[in-house]
Image (cartoon, rainbow, N blue to C red):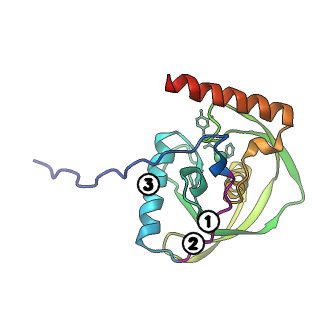
Amino acid sequence: MPAMSDTTAPALLTILRYPDPRLHTVAQAVAAVDERIRALVERMFATMYDANGIGLAATQVDVHERLIVIDVSEERQQRLVLINPEVEWASPETRKGDEGCLSVPGIYDGVERSVAIRVRALDEQGNSRVIEADGLLAVCIQHEMDHLMGKVFVEYLSPLKRNRIKSKLVKAERDARR
Ligand code: QAP
Ligand code: CO
């Protein structure tokens, strides 16, 4: 008999939903990249993959530390971990593209972002890395870094759109609880 897989799937985390006020918390730097952080990274990836997302910031799972997980690949096996990320450079050239968010389910709208960025961050071993990104990855990193500053993409939309989204999600939440 082949050996049973002994790797237990990490427990999923609950994703906060807009307009939960905790999404506006500003995250603190990760003090040490240790086993606690690595365990959190595993749970965040499991949560993100389970929800079919391409990016998840710790803020969205109510952990207010500067940690992001991303996988923009089709095959869902190109993990990127950004700890204490800082933007070193952002292209002055911008482009408007539709975004969504696991904390704002079912809503997609256009946001203007730099087309390319260079970010410095620690990986899950605590090593400093420089990531140069364009395309979807560049957009995703900017979107997730906003979360760490307490910013949700709908805040770039007009107050009218934002209020409609808020009402829709509050109602959906209410209906889901009945
Ligand atoms: C951020 O977003 C992002 O509404 C990551 O029903 C989005 O993973 C960066 C998702 C677009 C760049 C471009 C949203 C899944 C996932 C939903 C996500 C939904 C199911 C969003
Ligand atoms: Co998001």
How far apart, in angstroms, are the residues tagged by discs 2 and 1? 6 Å
Report helix, strand or loop for mark 3.
helix
**In the image as oriented, which residue stretches furthest toward the right?**
92
Q: CA distance from mark 3 to mark 2?
A: 17 Å
Q: Earlier in the sequence, mark 1 or mark 3?
A: 3
Q: Which mark is residue 66?
A: 1
At 66% from the left edge and 68% from the top edge, which residue is drawn? 85
Residue linked to disc 3 = 43
Residue at mark 2: 30
Three-letter amino acid code at the position of disc 2: Val
Front residue of 151 and 123: 151
Specify the label residue 33 is tagged with: none
Which is nearer the eye, 88 or 22?
22
Q: Residue at x 14, y 49 (%)?
A: 2
Describe the element under mark 2 as helix, strand or loop: loop
User: Residue 41 location, x and y as percent?
Assistant: 48, 60
Tell me if mark 1 has few (under 14), some (14-19) or many (20+) residues whose alpha carbon lies within 10 angstroms of its own: many
Say whether marks 2 and 1 touch (CB < 8 Å).
yes
In which image quadrant can residue 130 be found?
bottom right
24 relative to 40 in the view: left or right:
right
